[in-house]
């Protein structure tokens, strides 16, 4: 019986002969062989149908999966190292056109594959990518990380420098949506971890930046914030400020005494550094801002020393000035057209009134001279008396106090203004046009509360006025002494 010959020996001989021939070939011969093989493969694949291509790819995937499942850890690392070296050589030798063609082809493959994958497949792919990226990031050195980030920045800058306005807006909108979805789905622990990581990176980056880089970054931040503030609507601004207040309140409500002291000390140091480095022009701008936000907002207390009033004439004059300034302060903030009223001379350099119609109204009605204007306009009428002038002043003061604290003058022990046809604008429009935060003057409503020293002094002043500084109410009317 004839013994059947095995094909294994023949295959082994062919393989050995092929390996021997390839080990002896020169570089040019190897390149020529590989080029011929590529052309032959390209011709074969260009003529195959979709079914044949899919069958071939499935067969290759099966063979690769089987081969890789049997390889050892050393063989796996060696294969990956060889692949990286081959890819690096290939990337370094390819032209710009070849690179763009390769990337475009990869994008097409990726889009086609991801468009037909299921939700479970997508989640599995993303999870696998995250794990692979995490392993890669954990094993890379500092130099490799810097090279990777630098390369990413270069790619991003190159891509964004040639994108159109529509493409940029679409990219930013897509980023916002993706970030919003990510923020909405993250847990408290994930959020804290993310924020902590951001803080660490920011601290590390800012600790090694130069003075010029820091100034450039701060200037860029200021410009970006200014553009954002200028383009936001009233609702967006209120939402942003409300969110900031909520976050600040939440953060400060749970901070320890040591953390609070450290925060305040840090604020003082930062403010001191800012003051020390500011120029004369910046200092003047700061002073102008303080005039609007501190001095003017508390002008009832700063410019009117109520305890020193010696006569009702001073009460009439000074209450008119103080009331006027307090009422208009919030209406003048963040506006454009500066009023021409003399009483707004200091205030007008930093603020302005909202509209032309309102400007005329406030100059006539709310200016420092509105009491004298009232007298001149009605000087022929018999009922124009000092009592009426004082009543007008008290009505204005009551409108301000109601806007600030929500209480009437009588609750502070002060005389109440009497209704008058000339006061139709009073409580309705003053209250509607002013928007004082009740929290700001919470300490004013109760002199037993602590807080700001000026607010405490203002509360004491109101109570002292109720004890006899102003004339007494007689029969429901405010009466001036005969000496006037």
Image (spheres, grey):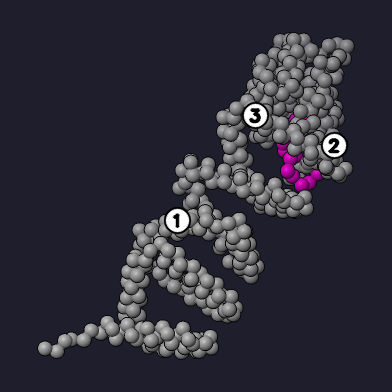
Q: Position of residue 462 (x, y in %)?
A: 73, 17
Q: Distance of mark 1 from mark 2, alpha carbons?
A: 63 Å
Instruction: Give the quarter of the figure containing the N terminus.
Output: bottom left
Q: Nearer the viewer, mark 3 or mark 2?
A: 3
Magenta stretch in the rendered image: 324-338
Q: Which residue is mark 1?
A: 131
Name the side, left or right, on which 73 lies relative to 334.
Answer: left
Taking depth in this image into account, of 290 and 409 the one nearest to the observer is 290
Q: Which mark is residue 260?
A: 3
Front one among 252 and 228: 252
Q: Note whether residue 395 is visible.
A: no
Residue 415: give x, y in percent of width and height: 72, 15
**Residue visible at 79% across and 40% down in the picture:** 274
SS assignment for the magenta stretch, majority:
helix
Instruction: Give the mark toward the camera: 3 or 1.
Output: 1
- Give the crowd class for mark 2: few <14, some 14-19, many >=20 residues within 10 Å: few
Q: Is residue 65 magenta?
A: no
State the mark number for residue 346: 2
- Numbered disc 1: secondary structure: helix
Rendering coords of residue 67 (x, y %) = 35, 70
């Amino acid at each position: 019986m004839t013994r059947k010959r095995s094909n294994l020996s023949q295959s082994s001989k062919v393989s050995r002969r092929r390996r021997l021939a390839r080990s002896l070939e020169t570089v040019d011969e190897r390149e020529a062989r590989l080029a011929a093989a590529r052309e032959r493969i390209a011709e074969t694949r260009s003529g195959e149908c979709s079914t044949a291509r899919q069958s071939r790819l499935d067969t290759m995937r099966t063979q690769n999966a089987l081969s890789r499942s049997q390889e050892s850890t050393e063989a796996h690392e060696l294969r990956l190292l060889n692949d990286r070296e081959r890819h690096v050589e290939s990337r370094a030798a390819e032209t710009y056109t070849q690179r763009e063609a390769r990337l475009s082809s990869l994008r097409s493959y990726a889009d086609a594959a991801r468009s037909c994958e299921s939700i479970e497949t997508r989640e599995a792919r993303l999870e696998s990518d995250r794990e692979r990226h995490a392993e890669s990031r954990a094993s890379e050195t500092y130099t490799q990380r810097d090279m990777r980030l630098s390369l990413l920045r270069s790619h991003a800058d190159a891509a964004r420098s040639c994108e159109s306005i529509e493409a940029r807006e679409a990219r930013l909108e897509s980023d916002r949506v993706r970030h919003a979805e990510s923020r909405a789905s993250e847990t408290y622990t994930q959020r804290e971890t993310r924020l902590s990581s951001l803080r660490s990176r920011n601290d590390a980056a800012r600790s090694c930046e130069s003075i010029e880089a820091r100034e450039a970054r701060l200037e860029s931040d200021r410009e970006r914030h200014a553009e954002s503030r200028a383009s936001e609507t009233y609702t967006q601004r209120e939402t942003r400020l409300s969110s900031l207040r909520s976050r600040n309140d939440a953060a400060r409500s749970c901070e320890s005494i040591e953390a609070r002291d450290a925060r305040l000390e840090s604020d003082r140091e930062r403010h001191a550094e800012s003051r020390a480095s500011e120029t004369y022009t910046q200092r003047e701008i700061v002073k102008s801002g303080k005039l609007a936000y501190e001095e003017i907002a508390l002008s009832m207390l700063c410019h009117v020393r109520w305890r020193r009033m010696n006569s009702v004439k001073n009460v009439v004059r000074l209450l008119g000035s103080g009331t006027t300034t307090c009422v208009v302060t919030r209406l003048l903030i963040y506006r454009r057209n500066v009023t021409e009223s003399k009483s707004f001379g200091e205030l007008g350099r930093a603020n302005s009134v909202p509209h032309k119609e309102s400007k005329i109204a406030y100059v006539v009605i709310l200016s420092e001279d509105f009491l004298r204007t009232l007298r001149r306009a009605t000087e022929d009428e018999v009922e124009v008396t000092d009592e009426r002038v004082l009543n007008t002043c008290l009505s204005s003061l009551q409108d301000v106090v109601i806007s600030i604290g929500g209480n009437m003058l009588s609750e502070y022990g002060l005389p109440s203004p009497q209704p008058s046809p000339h006061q139709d604008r009073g409580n309705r429009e003053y209250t509607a046009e002013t928007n004082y935060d009740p929290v700001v003057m919470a300490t004013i409503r109760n002199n037993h509360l602590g807080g700001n020293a000026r607010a405490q002094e203002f509360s004491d002043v109101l109570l002292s006025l109720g004890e006899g500084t102003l004339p007494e109410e007689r029969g429901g009317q405010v009466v001036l002494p005969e000496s006037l």
